[in-house]
């Protein structure tokens, strides 16, 4: 395992700039998640680190060595692709053994068997080794794909939305498992996703990325609680942060530059209105079981927040809303600290 | 598509299926009939083969096959009487026609030429075609579309249209009537088909497989051999069959450019005309034997072919 460093990395495809001036360091043993929407440049960043794409500008160092122009073979990284990760003409065993049988490694067959068995047990698929790769369920395939990466100890593991093709239950299980495995191995891992839960639960640090630019990097809590701008604030939080104009609700003393107030559900205190003091009306309640999503209209605006399942509020109730330490953003979307 | 969905767009109604089946059977009968005719003729005696009305029920004879593989001379009855008794059934069969075996015919050689030239050019076409198709599919080739069009354009006229220039060229280069010359010629004709077919197949194979192999420490060539080739097997098999069928059946160039050492079976078979009349059973025997390799080759590769002729339309 090693430290990976990107400095001012830019990658263009024709007129499109996929990654722009990316500065990112993944420390040895660190789990870094790049979070962003489709087309933000997450996958390109991974491919640049792997050497599948050549950077137009900037440099990439792996373990202190400049690999900016090096081919993938010599970079000693492993990659979990979003899809098409297994060779359909090989068995699960051969798929897992494939990276070890590379001519640059020359691992003896006995050692390969040992390692493959170990990995199969770690991923709980020991009974499937003789299967053809195409005879697995989606979840098993994905585990084998992750196993193919874990079977050797590269400088860094690169994972491109490895859980996106799984169903919700399996995804939750795999999140925990992947984090456990990463901790056990002390692995350096750069992971790409658009799923905020994956980012929040697994990352040591999250890098929020948009239009090829790294917007903010930090620990999950920092990213969540102290976003630098509106974009980062909207990436995290479920239900999403409410962005409301400064005059909509009484919020005490606002910073002068604040144009927009970002109110997450924990920033909103909601009460049934006394007569005449109502600001909003409950429009709709989504019952999720453990909690309720409350959709409130304030004038023309809609605000979504959470309430306890035993909340007495009902549809068409008049409510008052109070903001407690919300986030403030200026007219350009940058954070204004109170 | 459950059985309950009677009006499914995908599942056809029983009567359309019966109709389709009927059309296929009719078509099969029409195409198979000449083959059955040739097969039957090859087992007839020469008189039976030209009898009118044609004999459907007849006593099978191997005379056609014997005549195919031998050259014979007609002898006087006195000479025939002076001979010792025939050593085997072949000799007996020939002597019944007042002839003796003078030696083996050239059919074996010609057949072997067909095998060498047919499979040689097929291998070369598919080999070159696969590499070219891979390059066109994966790399930035300057003027890629123009080059692909150029490759296709070589098939826009019948190959025989260039027979005279090729004849002159081959005579100058000393390639006339050589195995190498014929292999190169058939490869030149087939390689454009091979490139186009195989490019379609290779385009269908996701790049991620090779990229995974590159990251796992394999070179581009190793990734190609270990990952791309096994997955392109279907396309390669289908392409090989198309190439072989062309090279195997080609008549015009073979007639023009080969006469001796490299002559293939197609121009040779019509020359099997026996002493005193047209030896149709021998010709039919030659045609029958000539069919066998291509039938075997197709059967061996048929599980690939069936999927292959959909031209990669079905995702694996």
Image: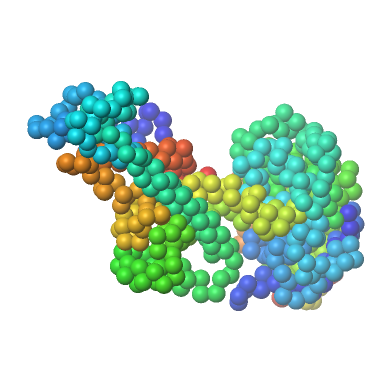
> Going 31% across and 61% down the picture, which residue do you hit?
B256
User: Compared with residue A3, is residue B303 higher up or lower down, i.e. above or below?
Assistant: above
User: Compared with residue B21, is residue A256 higher up or lower down, i.e. above or below?
Assistant: below
User: Compared with residue B147, is residue B12 higher up or lower down, i.e. above or below?
Assistant: above
Is residue B121 left or right of B106 when viewed as pictured? right
Of residues A182 and A40, the one nearer the viewer is A182
Is residue A159 left or right of A281 when viewed as pictured? right
Of residues B47 and B143, the one nearer the viewer is B47
Of residues A44 and B23, the one nearer the viewer is B23
Q: Using the rendered view, name the quadrant where residue B214 is placed.
A: bottom right
Quadrant of the drawing holding the N terminus of chain A:
bottom right
Where does the image place residue A294, in percent across and percent down from the top left?
A: 66, 48
> Going 48% across and 57% down the picture, which residue do you hit?
B125
Where does the image place residue A201, in percent across and percent down from the top left?
A: 80, 48
Let me know if residue B116 appears in the view: yes
Of residues A132 and A225, the one nearer the viewer is A132
Quadrant of the drawing holding the C terminus of chain A:
bottom right
The colour scheme applied to this rendered structure is: rainbow
Outermost residue, left side: B53
Q: Using the rendered view, name the quadrant where residue A59 is placed.
A: bottom right
Number of callouts: 0
> Going 35% across and 36% down the picture, which residue do you hit?
B11
User: Compared with residue B120, is residue A47 higher up or lower down, i.e. above or below?
Assistant: below
Where does the image place residue B95, in percent across and percent down from the top left?
A: 25, 29
Is residue B272 left or right of A63 when viewed as pictured? left
Let me know if residue B37 appears in the view: no
Where does the image place residue B220, in percent across and percent down from the top left?
A: 68, 59
> Going 67% across and 70% down the picture, which residue do you hit?
A18
């Amino acid at each position: 395992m090693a430290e990976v460093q990107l400095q001012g990395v830019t990658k263009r495809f024709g007129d499109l700039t996929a990654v722009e001036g990316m500065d990112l360091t993944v420390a040895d043993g660190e789990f870094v998640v790049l979070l962003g929407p489709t087309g933000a440049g997450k996958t390109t960043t991974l491919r640049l680190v792997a050497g599948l794409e050549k950077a137009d500008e900037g440099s990439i160092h792996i373990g202190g060595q400049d690999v900016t122009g090096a081919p993938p073979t010599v970079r000693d990284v492993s990659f979990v692709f979003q899809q098409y990760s297994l060779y359909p003409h090989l068995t699960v065993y051969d798929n897992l053994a494939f990276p070890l049988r590379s001519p640059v490694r020359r691992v003896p067959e006995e050692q390969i068997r040992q390692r493959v068995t170990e990995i199969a047990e770690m991923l709980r698929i020991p009974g499937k080794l003789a299967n053809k790769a195409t005879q697995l369920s989606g979840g098993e395939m994905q585990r084998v794909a992750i196993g193919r990466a874990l079977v050797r100890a590269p400088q860094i593991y690169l994972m491109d939305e490895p859980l996106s093709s799984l169903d919700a239950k399996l995804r939750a299980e795999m999140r925990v498992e992947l984090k456990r495995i990463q901790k056990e191995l002390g692995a350096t891992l750069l992971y790409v996703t658009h799923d905020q839960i994956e980012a929040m639960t697994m990352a040591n640090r999250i890098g929020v990325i948009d239009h090829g630019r790294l917007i903010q990097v930090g620990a999950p809590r920092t990213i969540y609680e102290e976003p630098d701008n509106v974009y980062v604030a909207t990436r995290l939080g479920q239900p999403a942060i409410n962005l409301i104009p400064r005059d909509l609700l009484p919020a005490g003393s606002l910073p002068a530059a604040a144009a927009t107030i970002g109110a997450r559900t924990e920033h909103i205190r909601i009460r049934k209105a006394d007569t005449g003091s109502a600001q909003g009306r409950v429009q709709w309640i989504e019952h999720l079981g453990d909690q309720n999503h409350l959709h409130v209209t304030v004038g023309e605006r809609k605000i979504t927040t959470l309430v306890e399942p035993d909340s007495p509020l009902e549809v068409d109730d008049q409510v008052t809303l109070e903001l407690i330490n919300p986030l403030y953003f200026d007219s350009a979307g940058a954070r204004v600290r109170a | 598509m459950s059985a309950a969905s009677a009006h499914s767009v995908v599942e056809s109604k029983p009567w359309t299926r019966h109709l389709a089946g009927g059309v296929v059977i009719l078509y099969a009968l029409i195409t198979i009939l000449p083959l059955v005719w040739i097969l039957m003729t090859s087992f007839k005696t020469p008189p039976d083969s030209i009898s009118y009305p044609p004999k459907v029920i007849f006593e099978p004879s191997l005379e056609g096959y014997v005549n195919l593989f031998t050259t014979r001379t007609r002898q006087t009855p006195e000479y025939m009487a002076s001979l010792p008794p025939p050593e085997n059934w072949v000799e007996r069969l020939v002597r019944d026609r007042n002839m003796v075996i003078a030696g083996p015919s050239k059919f074996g050689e010609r057949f072997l030429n067909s095998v060498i030239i047919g499979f040689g050019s097929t291998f070369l076409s598919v080999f070159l075609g696969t590499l070219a198709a891979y390059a066109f599919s994966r790399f930035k080739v300057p003027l890629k579309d123009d080059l692909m069009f150029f490759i296709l354009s070589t098939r826009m006229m019948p190959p025989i249209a260039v027979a005279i220039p090729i004849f002159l060229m081959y005579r100058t280069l000393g390639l006339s009537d050589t195995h190498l010359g014929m292999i190169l010629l058939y490869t030149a004709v087939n390689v454009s088909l091979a490139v186009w077919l195989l490019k379609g197949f290779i385009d269908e194979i996701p790049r991620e497989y090779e990229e995974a192999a590159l990251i796992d420490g394999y070179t581009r060539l190793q990734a190609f051999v270990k990952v791309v080739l096994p997955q392109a097997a279907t396309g390669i098999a289908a392409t090989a069959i198309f190439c072989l069928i062309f090279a195997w059946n080609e008549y015009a160039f073979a007639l023009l450019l080969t006469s001796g050492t490299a002559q293939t079976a197609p121009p040779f078979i019509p020359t099997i005309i026996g002493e005193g009349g047209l030896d149709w059973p021998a010709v039919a025997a030659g045609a029958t034997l000539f069919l066998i390799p291509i039938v075997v080759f197709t059967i061996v590769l048929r599980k690939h072919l069936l999927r292959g002729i959909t031209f990669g339309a079905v995702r694996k």
